Structures are given as structure tokens and as C-alpha cells.
Image: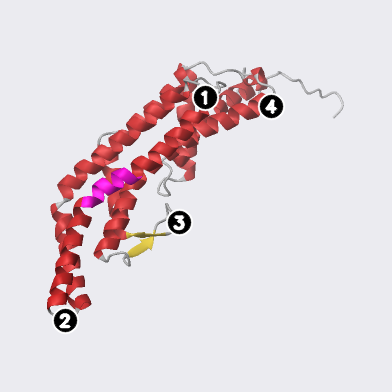
Amino acid sequence: MEGFQLIDTGSSGALPGMGLQFVMEALATLFLASLRIGAFLLASPFFGGTSVPVQARIVMAMLLGVAVVSNITVPAWQSFDSMMGFQVIVTELTIGIGAGLILTIWFSAALLAGEKIAASAGLGFAAQIDPDSGGQTPVVSKIFSIFLTVLFLSWNGHLVVLRVMIDTYEFLPIGTVPNFAALIQGGIAAFGSMFFAAAIIMLPISGFLVAINLAVGVISRSSPQMNLFAVGFPISMIVIFILLFLWVEALGGSLNSLSQMAVENMQNVLGALANG
């Protein structure tokens, strides 16, 4: 229309008095601050499970990013060029995913122990589709995993790991190149610790089941008329349920120690990243 002139006030309509440039800078800063913690939430065992929706993880990452921006100085996005900015994004994602995977590897010891116990007791056929792993998992392994998650939440382990990740911004600021060799070594060491912890957890049950199988084998050799599968399999099934019932307290202590050692190991690996 003639005589009508559009006046640019330099501010966004939704946020009067706040320039669009300031809004974009704030969003870029929040994006940088939430990359590391968001990647950790995607790769960690509890937060990264299918029971937690992706939308909830994104909102949680943004809220934690606001807490990081409020307490720690985050470099401005304009201080990085295009190549440096890409390197910073990859570095932040690597730190978060690496920390989450180390914790996940430690927690996988419960799944591995349950799988070996189920195979020794003849319960390997009792499997279900695990949405977290995407494949079939024995029911015993899933019970161990749920038990471990409950114990992890009971001593506020989820809050501890979030505190550990937020503390990394102080000794490993955004834009700093970490010691990736320490992250690789931490992941390899976590694999070894996973197998060792799984062996410690499953040895009492597996050893008892081996003794029962040896006894059934001796009986079958002394009495060939006795059907080994008709006698040995029901005995193993009954014994494994009794042993698991009597072993709950010791299993709880082992899984609780496992979760605490996993958090401590993750913290040590993240601390070693700053010693590059």
C-alpha cells in the first residue's frame, strides 16, 4: 500500500527488545554446551534405553546445557572457523559417546553372566526380544539387567554420572583436544573388566551346575537304563531356581559393586582425557 512503510526495530517479534543476532548466538552457545551431555545420554545404559523416549533425552540435554552455560564459560561460536567448528562438534560427540559406551560395556557384564548361567542350566531357549539390544536375550540375562538398573538408581548413580559429565566441562573445556588414546585404552580395559566381572558373578552358579552335571553323568554311567535327559534336565531346572533364590542377596551385592566400579572407571577415563 502506498504510504505504508515497514519499520525494522531490529528485534524479534516474539522476544521484544532482544535482537535476532543475540538469539542466534544464545542458541549456538546452548547447542555447543549440550552436545557432550546429549551424546552421553544417547549412549549410556539407562538414559539410552528404549524406555526413555528420544524427545525426553533431547529435552534433558537442553536443560543440562542451560545449567552448563550458567556455570561455565562457553566459547562463542564466532571464535571458531568452519573447519574448527566441525572439529569441536566431533570432539564433543566423541567424549560423550565414549563415556556412555564405557558405562554400557561395564553394565553388559550382567547380561553376559546371565547368558552363561542360562546356557549352563538349559534355560537358553527361554529368550525374548530385547528392544535395547535388538536381538533375542535370555530371560535370566534380562532379569539381571533390570536388577542392576534398579540397584544403580537406588544409590543415585544416574545423578552421579550426570554430575561427572558436567564436571568434565571444567577440566576439559569446549574446544580443547582431549587425549583420545586414553579413551581408546579405557574402552579396551572396560571390555576386559566386563568379562572378568561376568566370570566372577556366574562362577558360583555355574560351578554348582557343573558339579550336578558330573553327578548325573556318574549316575547315568552306573545305571545305563536311566535316561540322562529325562532325569538330568529336570534336576538342573529345579536346582537353578533354588540357587537363584538363595543367591539373591549375594547377587545384589555383586551387581551393586559392579555399578559403582563402572561409574568410578568412567570418571577415571574422563580424567585421563585431560592429560593429553
Q: Position of residue 50 (x, y in %)?
A: 43, 49
Q: Residue at x 13, y 73 (%)?
A: 219
Decide which of tag 4 and tag 2 comes sooner along the chain. Answer: 4
Which numbered dot is residue 83?
4
Classify residue 237 by image quadrant: bottom left
Q: Is residue 35 magenta?
A: no
Q: Residue at x 43, y 38 (%)?
A: 188
Residue range highlighted in magenta: 195-203
Q: Amino acid at mark 3?
A: Gly
Q: Nearer the viewer, residue 178 or 226?
A: 226
* Residue 45 in view (yes/no): no
| Residue at image mark 3 | 134
Q: Amino acid at mark 2?
A: Pro
Q: Nearer the viewer, mark 1 or mark 2?
A: 2
Decide which of tag 4 and tag 1 comes sooner along the chain. Answer: 4
Q: Position of residue 124 (x, y in %)?
A: 31, 64
Disc 3 versus disc 4: distance between alpha carbons?
36 Å
Q: Nearer the viewer, mark 4 or mark 1?
A: 1
Which numbered dot is residue 224?
2
**Label 2 crowding class (10 Å Cα cut-off): few <14, some 14-19, many 20+?**
few
* Residue 205 in view (yes/no): yes
